[in-house]
Amino acid sequence: MLEARAEAPFAAAHEDAAPRLVTWRSLAPSYGLAALATLLMGLFAVSWGTVHIPPLAVAEILLGRLPLVPAGDHPATWSAIVWDIRVPRVVLAGLVGATLAYSGAAYQGVFRNPLAEPYLIGVAAGASVGATLVIISPLAVTAGVLSPLPPAAFAGALVAVGIAWMLARAGRGVSTVSLILSGVAVSSLGTSVVTYLMLTYTDRTLSILNWVLGGFNTATWTRTQILLPYAAACGALLLPYARTLNVLQLDEDEARRLGVNVERVKLVVLGLASLATAAAVSVSGLIGFVGLVVPHTVRMVWGPDHRRLLPLSAFLGASFLIAADTIARSADAGREVPIGVITALVGAPFFLFLLRRQQRARVMP
Amino acid sequence: MLEVRGLRGGYRDRAVLHDIDLRVERGEVCVLLGPNGCGKSTLLRAITGALPLAEGDVRIEGVPVRGMSAADVARRVAVVAQAAPLPERFIASDVVMMGRTPHLRLLQSEGRRDAAIVRDAMRAAGCWELRERYVDELSGGEAQRVLIARALAQEPLLLLLDEPTSHLDLRHQVATFALVRDLCRARGIAAVAVVHDLTLGAMFADRVALMADGRIVAAGAPHEVLRAEAIAGVYGVPVRVVPHPVSGTPVVVVAPPAGAARTQGVAS
Amino acid sequence: MTRTRSTRLGLALAVAALALLAAACGDSKSGSGSRPTPTPAASFPVTLDRSDGKTLTLDAAPQRIVSLSPGATEIIYALGAEGSLAAVDNQADYPQAAKDFPTKVDAYQPNVEAIAGLDPDLVFVATDSDGIVAALDRLHVPVLFSDLNTVTTIDGVYDQIRLLGRATGTSGRAEDLVAALQARERAVTGAVADVSDGPRVYHELDSTFYTASDASFIGDLYRLLHARNIAGDGGGNPYPQLTQEAILAANPDVIVLADEEFGVSVDSVKARPGWDEVAAVKDNRIYGVDPDVISRPGPRIIDALETLAKDLYPEKFG
């Protein structure tokens, strides 16, 4: 034993080991695994629901669309339920979950604040104002292609973020503290406007509240088509900034001294994340906790490196929201449970857990 | 190869620095001394280009800093700030690797060469054995070595240190100064350090610049600059300067105040 | 599809006999005059029970009534007592005279001062929002509070009519109205008495699949018609939200839409992905209904019953 220890300093091979490198290639296996896990979660979700459809039948129904695969013999309603109800819901829930989660990771990276999440600087409040204005207007509100609701919510979200950004500007840049304050101000204003409208247009109160709570019970392929380009493009454009976001964790002055154009990075990262979040809430309402809880979880398990944090948050967010939506549509025997309730039921205990962990870290040497 | 000429600059409503001329050669350590508020840290900021200059010029190897992008500056100048905050849950080698940022493009990942530079920097700074440790768990002295390693990883021509030792105990203060001086000599890096401790600064510096009210009142070798009258004039405290019994560098000792108050200002 | 009033009225006349004609005559469609309602001397003073357990005593027939409930407004007009109205709520839209009534007050966010300022001698409240009942009590304004949530059946509507009859001194007319409505009700329920397995019904309240369960007022109508509400008892919830999967699995025979004002139409329902296998869609049995008529506890509830009867049993009521 003693000899081995004496030997250790001279174990040249081990000593000379260079620090482990994080490259896109080295991360590929973890991305692949995460994608696979999400896919499995999706398949599980599609086989689960109020109507009991045996997994074998589900597999037949799913594969039956492929050429050369024989279509099985099962009730026509089953096929409709799987392809027209469950699959669109699962896909949309996954896409929204991924978007909210990676946007949350981006926000947390820029603000370096554990409470940061994608609704921080006004996306949620702005979207709800836009949606409410459409709901109370004579415009028809349908779940169809030409519904003006998603564009209105989207526009509202972007306007609110733009206002918050303008308010926070001072001189050359935008300080994160100013942005948080202006974001809170804009959000409060938006919320009070929506509340007032809800109480004035009482025959629409339920519709407005319903939109705000969010959910996937009216999920359609159209909504997925609306969200997909934004979610994919913003996610892809954020990934190159992952390493820079790591450097940003050093505090802005240090990052500047390392050559990072901090103001531009903040603008680009928050801009992309806000755009993606605006698109997500415009098709699914305001679902809370995903953008906050998922990135924290990924950080706790896999570390703070954003090259891992951003993509893994996306996958975990997708799985999380798919699971939550499955519970939302199956827990109460054919009745919908608002999905925000489920995410909150997970989120609140999670906060307590984070708090205890924080306290324990202080107590132990 | 750091040349500052006729520099005047400051904040929006008032100029802090006046008429600054400074020259530091490769491999030299120049220590900035002076009371609080005399402009030492501001001068460092002006050198990196973070401060807008009303007049004057800062050149590194003949290239003016004005007009350089942040990345261009970062490829030439590395800064070790006072007790810089370190992010949670990153390990030391990750933090040192961040020093490679100015040399990497947006989509580019770190490569084997970067890893070799990091290893070399951490060895030189004496923190290689800390490479897998979480930075938020390091002691003051250990963290300082990691920051120095990160600065080295930038492959700088110029190293700026802003009170790098004020928060460290005596042993680590000495270790840090020695490390910086040895690294600069070995790698031909010029260094400018803002320091509080006159004696330690003098012991490790090749040149000293004494500042007061935004001006350099004296610059040169330590024993030339650190004279009792000059120090008393700048700091407003009576001192005695004696040669160090081992190194021969000036040791500044505070003279106990007499009953009667002394006048401020330069005593001849 | 909505049907015109005259078709319904014609149908009602064909089914009922003399009692229906009397009720139709009693149904005042003209605008309100300003002559006070004649009252038999013996009906006052009258003591009425409120939903909060207190009682209200009226010494004389009220002449300045403020109605904070659109259902009560309809009943008051049906009783011919509209001459005593001082103000109606801003949701009132039937009959036309109520919609055009010059003085309106907000019923959901009631302003106590505005109401008291009208110097009413009776305020009818169906929803105690913002503590309006207590506030009016403090100002010694006579308040008749009859909680809307307690009206869960058609019999509850009859009780409302009787209550308002006593409050306005028109008990005689109230009894006549109730009798006429009951006759029409019996005509409908009699015709479906032999039905043991009525059609499965999905009643849609809005485009996110909110429905009315057996526990709701609307659910009571379906119960009378022996229809099977796919929402069941809603787990106790009168207005649960269903999942699309559950709706498809339940395969309703008839779909009743109460959300056409939200842009939902027969065609948009048919176009919903996955719904083409639903019996109601295949058999083209999707009907719209006026949400005000069907959910307001007033005399038109029997109109709603008759409409639904025809939708559910075209072979019996066609």
Image (cartoon, rainbow, N blue to C red):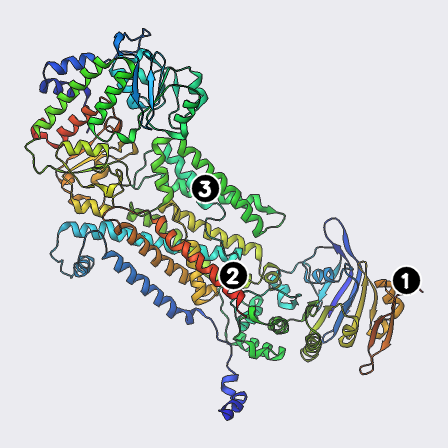
Image quarter (top left, top right, bottom left or bottom right) of the C terminus of chain B: bottom right
Q: Amino acid at mark 1?
A: Val
| Inter-mark Cα distance, 2 to 3 | 27 Å
The answer to whether dots 1 and 3 both sit on one chain is no
Residue tagged 3:
A126
Chain where mark 1 sits? B
Kind of element beneath mark 1: loop
Residue topped by disc 1: B266
Q: Is residue C139 above or below residue C250?
A: above
Q: Are marks 2 and 3 on the same chain?
A: yes
Q: Position of residue A220 (x, y in %)?
A: 28, 47
**Where A106 falls versus C210 (above or below)?**
below
Q: Amino acid at mark 2?
A: Leu
Q: Chain of mark 2?
A: A
Q: Is residue C54 above or below residue B51?
A: above
Circle 2 — which element? helix
